[in-house]
Image: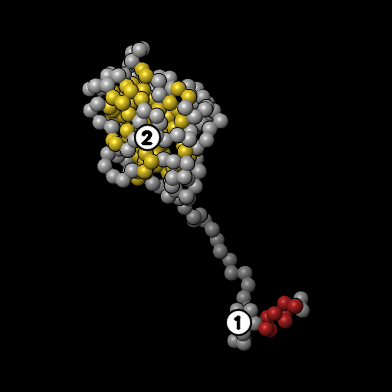
């Protein structure tokens, strides 16, 4: 495979390109999936891509689909108006800021700066030399109307064309529905005998209410 999506990290939108923490209270590490995510939650997702077999030029685009695989299926590009997930404005960076090496592996000099983005998808094309890596990150938001207890996967493509490989495939699972309480006690508080002389509220009932 010429290019491989080899690492990822879900992050909170709580810092710059280099200082933002891992997603959630547990500060999840790289290559760890996000679970029990409430609808309406903003987050950031970072990918690293390596050019293995040869140099490669790609236009990185982030996409999602329901399920936990980065291959096959029906994929949707994330835009400002896409369903389930959308691009999310951030006050912690400027769209198009350069990335530094945060999650990719490799020696110094083997990294090519990518971009961190809040309103752009796909990114401008980039050429990755053989055996070098790059990192791209997007600020995103889970829709308020996303289904509960559903898993979605994410990937980078070359503007819609799958990369050569997906060693690590990030997934996010939405929060479970809150079950109804089981300890509720119901009480029959009132009753009334009525004539069958009108609608749901009869004339007699209306007159009675007026006299109160």
Q: Position of residue 6 (x, y in %)?
A: 31, 27
Indicate the position of residue 189 as horizontal and vertical percent values.
62, 69
Residue 159: image location, x then y, percent: 34, 35
- Whether residue 55 sits left or right of residue 19 in the image: it is left
As drawn, 162 above or below 81: above
Q: Mark 2 = which residue?
A: 61
Q: In which quadrant of the rendered view does residue 102 lie?
A: top left
Cα–Cα gap, marks 1 and 2 = 61 Å
Task: For marks 1 and 2, give the one nearer the viewer.
Answer: 2
Depth check: 58 or 3 in front?
A: 58
Lower position in the chain sequence, tag 1 or tag 2: 2
Residue 51 is situated, as x and y percent measured from the top left of the image, at: 28, 23
Please give the count of numbered marks on the rendered protein. 2
| Residue drawn at the location 52% of the way across and 27% of the way down | 93
Q: Which residue is drawn at 37% across and 39% down?
A: 63
Q: In this view, does 211 lie to the left or right of 187?
A: right
Q: What residue is shown at x 68% (from left), y 80% (from top)?
A: 205
Label 2's element? Answer: strand
Relative to 193, does residue 99 appear above or below in the rendering? Answer: above
Query: Can residue 186 be seen by looking at this rendering?
Result: yes
SS class of the residue under badge 1?
Answer: loop
Left or right position of 157 against 85? left
Looking at the image, residue 153 lies above or below residue 204: above
Q: Which mark is residue 199?
A: 1
Crowd tier of the residue under label 2, counting other residues whose Cα lies within 10 Å: few below 14, some 14–19, many 20 or above = many
Q: Can residue 27 be seen in this view?
A: no
């Amino acid at each position: 495979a010429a290019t491989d999506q080899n690492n990822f990290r879900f992050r909170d939108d709580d810092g710059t390109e280099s200082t933002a923490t891992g997603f959630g209270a547990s500060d999840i590490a790289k290559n760890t999936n996000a679970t029990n995510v409430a609808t309406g939650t903003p987050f950031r997702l970072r990918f690293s891509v390596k050019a293995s077999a040869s140099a490669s030029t790609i236009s990185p685009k982030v996409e999602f689909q329901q399920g936990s695989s980065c291959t096959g299926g029906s994929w949707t590009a994330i835009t400002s108006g896409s369903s389930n997930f959308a691009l999310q404005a951030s006050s912690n960076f400027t769209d198009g800021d350069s990335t530094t090496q945060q999650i990719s592996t490799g020696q110094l000099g083997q990294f090519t700066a990518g971009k961190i983005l809040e309103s752009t998808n796909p990114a401008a094309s980039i050429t990755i030399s053989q055996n070098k890596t790059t990192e791209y990150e997007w600020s995103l938001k889970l829709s308020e109307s996303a289904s509960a207890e559903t898993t979605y996967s994410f990937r980078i493509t070359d503007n819609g064309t799958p990369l050569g490989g997906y060693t690590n495939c990030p997934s996010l699972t939405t929060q479970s529905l809150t079950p109804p309480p089981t300890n509720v006690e119901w009480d029959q508080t009132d009753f009334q005998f009525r004539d069958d002389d009108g609608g749901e509220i009869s004339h007699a009932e209306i007159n009675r209410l007026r006299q109160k």
